[in-house]
Image (cartoon, rainbow, N blue to C red):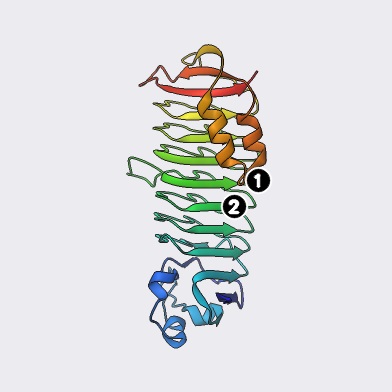
């Protein structure tokens, strides 16, 4: 059966909150009811029907034909068993607090993509802005599960306070990758900048390019890591380049000893 589809009529005149447009929230609603859902974020009203043409389909698969950097909270709190695809860009907080399912974005994503993600598989085929998988102000932890793959670049502080899960960045990463990392795994295949792994407690950063490390990371020498080879097998379908990096012999740097100090940065020899 074809996907339940929202076709963009025009560029939104304001930022829109699309958190209400997930399969579980739309279940049982008629097309007329869906068209009346308020998605505006200012005092000027804007409803789903003002922005989208809707085509009935299987609600297990939701599709946006056309995207915008003003599409906020796409796939927020998505549940397991559902999938969502955006043929274009999205705005802030893609997949915010998603419980599971799969989200695919053909374009780029705004700040705080995958913030609080608990179990969704999120693929961004373009770039991701700053604070990828990071917590919002006042929160103690960022992403707590799931898997995120960015085919392009990521902005500053990607993986900030990552709690659990896997983050793969195939392009360059902005400053302070993995800052305040609690746990989980970050794999970056491009260049990195700034204080990589700053205040890392017990997370793993696997970097294809050798970064300039803080003196609080200690060189532990070359390692034969069984977990890296096992992880490589599980990641091959998502990122052949990441799997290839994990399959070579790696040098381990332990830290950040300025804090708990049980984390690590792994680089090829």
Residue nearest the observer in this picture, 167 or 71 = 167
Residue 206 is situated, as x and y percent measured from the top left of the image, at 56, 29
- Alpha carbon of mark 1 to alpha carbon of mark 2: how far? 8 Å
Q: How crowded is the residue under tag 1: few (<14 C-alpha within 10 Å), some, or many (20+)? A: some
Residue at image mark 1: 152
Residue at 53% over, 44% down: 130
Residue 247 is situated, as x and y percent measured from the top left of the image, at 63, 29
Residue nearest the observer in this picture, 238 or 181 = 238
Q: Is residue 46 above or below residue 150?
A: below
Specify the quadrant that holds the N terminus.
bottom right
Left or right: 221 as drawn, with respect to 141: right
The reply to whether callout 1 and callout 2 are in contact (CB within 8 Å) is yes
Q: What is the residue that sits farthest to the bottom in this orientation? A: 32
Residue at image mark 2: 124
Residue at 62% over, 41% down: 236
Q: Is residue 251 above or below residue 125?
A: above
Residue 37 is situated, as x and y percent measured from the top left of the image, at 41, 78
Residue 140 is situated, as x and y percent measured from the top left of the image, at 33, 40
Residue nearest the observer in this picture, 184 or 139 = 184
Quarter of the rendering containing residue 63: bottom right
Residue at 46% over, 56% down: 95
Question: Which of disc 2 and disc 1 is earlier in sequence?
Answer: 2
Q: Secondary structure at mark 1?
A: loop
Quarter of the rendering containing residue 246: top right
């Amino acid at each position: 059966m074809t996907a339940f589809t929202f076709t963009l009529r025009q560029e939104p005149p304001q930022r829109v909150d699309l958190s209400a447009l997930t399969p579980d929230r739309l279940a049982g609603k008629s097309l007329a009811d869906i068209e009346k859902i308020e998605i505006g974020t200012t005092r000027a009203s804007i409803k789903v029907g003002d922005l989208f043409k809707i085509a009935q389909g299987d609600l297990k698969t939701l599709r946006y034909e056309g995207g915008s950097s003003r599409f906020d909270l796409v796939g927020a709190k998505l549940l397991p068993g559902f999938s969502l695809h955006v043929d274009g860009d999205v705005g802030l907080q893609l997949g915010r607090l998603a419980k599971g399912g799969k989200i695919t974005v053909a374009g780029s994503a705004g700040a705080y993509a995958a913030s609080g993600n608990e179990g969704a598989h999120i693929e961004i085929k373009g770039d991701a802005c700053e604070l990828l998988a990071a917590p919002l102000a006042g929160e103690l932890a960022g992403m707590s599960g799931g898997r995120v793959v960015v085919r392009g670049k990521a902005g500053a502080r990607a993986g900030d306070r990552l709690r659990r899960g896997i983050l793969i960045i195939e392009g360059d990463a902005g400053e302070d990758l993995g800052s305040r990392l609690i746990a989980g795994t970050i794999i970056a295949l491009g260049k990195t900048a700034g204080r990589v792994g700053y205040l890392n407690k017990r997370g793993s950063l696997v970097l294809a390019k050798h970064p300039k490390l803080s003196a609080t990371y200690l060189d532990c020498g070359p390692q034969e890591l069984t977990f890296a080879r096992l992880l490589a097998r599980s990641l091959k379908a998502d990122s052949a380049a990441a799997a290839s990096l994990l399959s070579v012999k790696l040098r381990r740097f332990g830290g950040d000893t300025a804090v708990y100090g049980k984390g690590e940065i792994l680089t090829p020899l």
